[in-house]
Amino acid sequence: MLAPLYLFNQIARTLTDRAQSLAGSPGKILRLGWVLNLSLSALLWTSGLLAGPGLAFATGPDGAALFEVHCAGCHIHGGNIIRRGRTLKLKALENQGITSPAAIATIANQGIGQMGGYGEVLGTGGPEQVGLYVWQQALAGWEPLPSPFVQPESRVPASQTNPINPG
């Protein structure tokens, strides 16, 4: 982590010297701004501060995100709005002989019954990631995840938020 900071310090010192020599030349100062922007972006990328989401996708698609985009329309919270008995709940999966993430991945890829396959839209590794996500959710009982926006301890009672009746 010290190497990127040292590099940034050197770049900042050089650009400061260059900016002082360009005083009174708006076009050159604008180009200098672009150089500074690109240099800072490169520094942040190499230090890993900016590379997080890109590297996360490089390891493979996210099963939860793929499920939300391609599957949750019919299988909201593990249910099934088309055929009630064909849910993604653990008991229903086991009744159908689906007992592993690989079995779910095969169905996501090729389809089953009325459901067509989604292998092409899920992309390389997508069916496997969706299969793993669905299996984990089935084992957990499809409990909804807590919202990242409102934490239970931060909720304010309605009586304190009503401007008409503050007390």
Image (cartoon, rainbow, N blue to C red):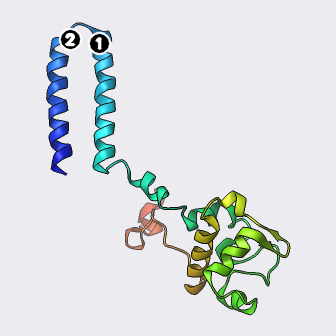
Mark 2 lies on a secondary structure that is loop
Numbered circles on residues, count: 2
In the image, residue 24 above or below residue 9: above
Q: Which of 134 and 78 is in front in this view?
A: 134
Which percent across, then down, holds residue 154?
38, 68
Q: Nearer the viewer, residue 16 or 3?
A: 3
Q: Mark 1 points at which residue?
A: 28
Q: Which amino acid does label 2 sit on?
A: Leu
Q: Are marks 1 and 2 in contact (CB under 8 Å)?
A: yes
- In primary-sequence order, the first of circles 1 and 2 is 2
- In this view, the residue farthest toward the right is 114
Q: Residue at x 41, y 64 (%)?
A: 160
Which percent across, then down, holds residue 113?
85, 76
Q: Which residue is drawn at 29% across and 36% down?
A: 40
In the image, residue 84 above or below residue 13: below
Gap in angstroms between the C-alphas marked 1 and 2 = 7 Å
Q: Mark 2 points at which residue?
A: 22
